[in-house]
Amino acid sequence: MDLDIAAAAITTYLTGHRLAQTDDPAERAALHAVHAVRLGHAGRHESALEEAERAIGILRHLAGNDPRALPQLAASLNGAGIYLSVLGRREDALSPTAEAARIFRKLADSDPDRYRHELAIALTNLGNRLSDLGRPKQALAPAEEAAGIYRALSAVDPGEHLPYFSASLINLSNRLAELGRHGDALPIAEEAATIDRRLTRTDPQSHLPELAKSLNALAIRLANVGQVSTALDRAEEVVGIYRGLARTNPDAYLRDLAVSLHNLGKILFLLGNVDQACGVAEESVDIRRMLVRKNPEAYVFLLATSLQNLAVYRANLGLREEALSAADEAIEYLEPLAERLPEMFAAILAGIRQARAEMTRLPSR
């Protein structure tokens, strides 16, 4: 059994037992907060969100009279933002994340040695949430600030801060790439992958998932600058890592496996290996269909992007009807998203519609 799953199961039992034994609000908030973290690590994000919201409700009341509750409140807000994002509630995720960053900035202003680490975490997540909402220019500044904080902290205490520094570099690389600054994004992704590979050699159990994330970012950055063959090696390594992780903890890692397959398919296509790209894309679609059945709001856009790529690959193989079928399904999923958030999804929908129109000109078999 995956250790995170086991820890969540144990914490679920202990939390219920301990809650029954205390009426102290601070103790109850701490129990809910810890339980949320354990559930989140195990991939049980809906339950994690519920626990984080319970902690937030108690801590808001406490913080109104006692500022010592503010760090715990900010941490729970930060967690709630992450769980909301994973569950596909992008608009809802921004507010708690921004509030967490504001609280930690005030705390860091008064006690930087104690709270700069937490501020950097909150800034990293704020950049991610802004990116999720299609606001890449706004997302860059918090990502840069977080990476700068962690670079300084890891120089003083690498054992404590290097994993966080690497994660902040991945996010900064992603933000730069979203702005088309691929040349700037590549060396940052390389630095993150170097750190995570070194950490994984000393503690694979703790750091292998982070290595997969950094290698995934590196593969995309390499492809963006035309180093596609090297990108393929990294992308295949990522898929191998996530296959192993998903076998032991599917709730936590199937989503990441689908992402890695999606990216591997794009790289194979760039190399002209269209048959292989098609097979990989079909596997990504299959996983995302399963995830959509469990949580449509979180995964329907990701399924649409996999279907979009699958349609393109099939069209390049001359599979006209199969390509049109995948494109039509992608459009069906994207239309309500584009109506709700046109600034994020309208251009994507227009692109797949244009691609579908070109597919209709293919000869029928």
Image: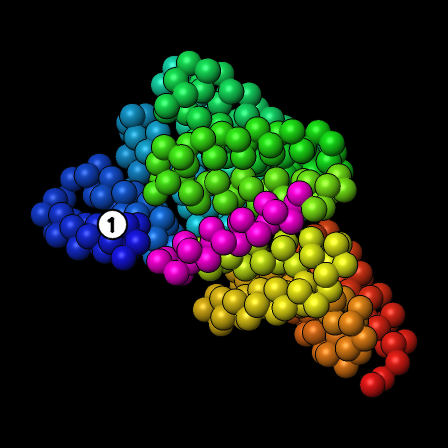
Question: For residue 315, which quarter of the picture?
Answer: bottom right
Residues shaded magenta? 230-250
x, y (%) of residue 114?
Answer: 36, 18
The image's colouring method is rainbow
Q: Is residue 129 above or below residue 188?
A: below
Q: Is residue 238 magenta?
A: yes
Dominant secondary structure of the residues highlighted in magenta in the image: helix
Q: Residue at x 42, y 43 (%)?
A: 208
x, y (%) of residue 180?
Answer: 76, 38
Question: For residue 66, which quarter of the picture?
Answer: top left
Instruction: Name the foreground residue: 75 vs 185.
Output: 185
> Residue beneath label 1, please?
7
Instruction: Name the foreground residue: 59 vs 199.
Output: 199
Q: Quadrant of the C terminus?
A: bottom right
x, y (%) of residue 86?
Answer: 49, 53
Instruction: Name the foreground residue: 215 vs 182.
Output: 215
